[in-house]
Image (spheres, coloured by chain):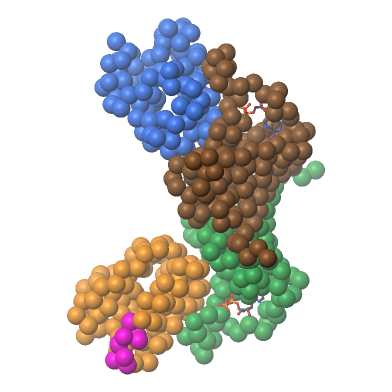
Chain colours: A brown, B blue, C green, D orange
């Protein structure tokens, strides 16, 4: 039953942006090890940094006593990343679309959009304090 | 993360090295804001040389969009020099292609201001 | 009360030596961020890899269903690393001294020795399934 | 991790690049064992060029100690070329200084066999 490879890596960070580079190297290493093509590596890397930044900044408000956690589930055909924070969440539909003309020149508000553009699936759970993202080895829509 | 500031005539050139990600972007924002402030309402002409920037996230993008907006307010202009594939595709995704002029040589970028 | 910086980073890995490079990049990043001098960085890096290798190989016997965990406690004056495995432990005093002439040419048995040589403190707890190692910013014996 | 195998006369030279850590060390062990096997009991003269090895752990050390022991058994010899400070201090700590001769040029290392 289910002899597929499944490796679970778990990382927990105190909520300071100073440590975002650690998340960057961990996801970079995982993506390289999984042999994703270079463009996909860049996309997933970006999505993870955006999700991590949101967890640390918006979720945990950079309180170093709160942790942001990152679960990386490596399977033969896909990588699943679950990011959690200890904040009070948000409603996805309340966030403005950064591609609307009136928002194009805003200096923020592009993180969720980029996550969704870069990953195959992005699911918000527990009021947005859990973000689950999936990237397939062969993108299903290609 | 390293940012080098140069002037060529009335043009300000920022050579940026490293990833424009997370806290790194604050340094860039401060330097740009400083230049705008020093111009004291006069138009600023700025080249952001991104040749040595591998990666940029939405914070990095936010800094250059903010620079674009406030520099335009005084009839100045920001252009991008030597952007790689990653950053090009980020700008395309964010629908900012029409906003940022991009050049492959410093000479072209400078000429674009005159 | 205790306004000192204390950052806790936690990493959990499935027990395959394939992932030891992840441990390597995480500890390298932390050491660089903490501004340890280069020689100290190399020493702590080596100790962490040795402890991680032992947890994965000897403790968890490379069973990917078992996890090796790494806690990094960053404080102003020191770095504490706690490595745990899900194995059945060992007795430190049963391990031969690799510096004895009859052991010099053995191809293994130097890991614990190197950990102890490279860190300021190494403490074995819970039968050796928990290894706690400390490196001070200013080595206390220098 | 990359290992390049060269022969200069009767001397085998392994140019090693990367960190001799964890699973990486297995590749080196296999290549060395192969050379010993191919020698078929004749003495092996081997240079391990560690110029491009930044880091070595006890597994890496174990591989070169094992090589030393089995090559010596047939009256051969292993020497180290271009070791950096890290690896030197590792060898010192492990009390293996008297076991491994170390050279800074390939010519010296080759000459040491004759
Ligand atoms: N993990 C989170 N916790 C709470 N709020 C969040 C979280 N992630 C996103 N948000 C909310 O969604 C908004 C949009 O986020 P995003 O698209 O990443 O842009 P930005 O981070 O630049 O504001 C944020 O300003 C915040 O209000
Ligand atoms: N985490 C551990 N769990 C069980 N046994 C261990 C552990 N760490 C070390 N040991 C035991 O101690 C011995 C010596 O370990 P070490 O000095 O690292 O050398 P080596 O790993 O080369 O054998 C191991 O062979 C093993 O029997």
Task: Give the overall secondary structure of the magenta segment.
Answer: helix
Q: State the residue at coordinates (32%, 13%).
A: B113
The x, y position of residue D84, in whole percent, is 38, 65
Q: Is residue D5 placed above or below A50 in the rendered structure?
A: below
The x, y position of residue C106, in whole percent, is 50, 85
What is the residue that sits farthest to the right in this orientation?
Answer: C1
Q: Which residues are magenta?
A: D35-42
Pick the front one: A31 or D68: A31
Residue D83 part of the magenta segment: no
Q: State the residue at coordinates (57%, 45%).
A: A135
The x, y position of residue C18, in whole percent, is 53, 64
The x, y position of residue C1, in whole percent, is 80, 43
Q: Quadrant of ligand 1?
A: top right
Tell me if I can see residue C72 in this picture: no
Pick the front one: B113 or D76: B113
Does C18 sit left or right of C129 as displayed?
A: left
Q: Quadrant of residue C98?
A: bottom right
Q: Is residue C69 placed above or below B95 in the rendered structure?
A: below
Q: Quadrant of residue B98?
A: top left
Q: Quadrant of residue B108?
A: top left
Q: State the residue at coordinates (44%, 45%).
A: A38
Q: State the residue at coordinates (68%, 38%).
A: A123
Tell me if I can see residue B111 in this picture: yes
Residue D37 part of the magenta segment: yes
Image quadrant holding the C terminus of chain B, namely top left
């Amino acid at each position: 039953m289910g002899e597929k490879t499944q490796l679970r890596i778990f990382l927990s960070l105190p909520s300071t942006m100073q440590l975002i580079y650690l998340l960057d190297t961990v996801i970079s290493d995982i993506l390289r090890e999984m042999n994703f093509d270079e463009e996909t590596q860049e996309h997933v890397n970006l999505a993870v940094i955006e999700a991590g930044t949101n967890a640390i900044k918006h979720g945990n408000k950079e309180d170093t006593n709160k942790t942001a956690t990152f679960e990386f589930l490596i399977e033969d055909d896909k990588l699943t990343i679950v990011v959690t924070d200890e904040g009070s969440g948000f409603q996805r539909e309340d966030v403005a679309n950064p591609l609307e003309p009136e928002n194009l020149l805003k200096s923020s508000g592009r993180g969720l959009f980029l996550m969704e553009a870069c990953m195959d699936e992005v699911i918000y759970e527990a009021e947005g304090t859990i973000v689950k993202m999936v990237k397939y080895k062969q993108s299903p829509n290609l | 993360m390293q940012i080098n500031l140069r002037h060529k005539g009335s043009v300000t050139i920022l050579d940026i090295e490293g990833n424009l990600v997370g806290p790194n972007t604050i340094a860039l924002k401060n330097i740009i804001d400083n230049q705008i402030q020093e111009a004291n309402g006069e138009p600023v002409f700025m080249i952001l040389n991104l040749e040595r920037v591998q990666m940029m996230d939405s914070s990095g993008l936010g800094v250059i969009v903010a620079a674009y907006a406030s520099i335009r307010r005084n009839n100045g202009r920001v252009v991008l020099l030597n952007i790689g594939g990653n950053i090009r595709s980020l700008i395309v995704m964010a629908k900012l292609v029409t906003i940022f002029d991009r050049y492959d040589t410093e000479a072209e970028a400078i000429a674009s201001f005159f």
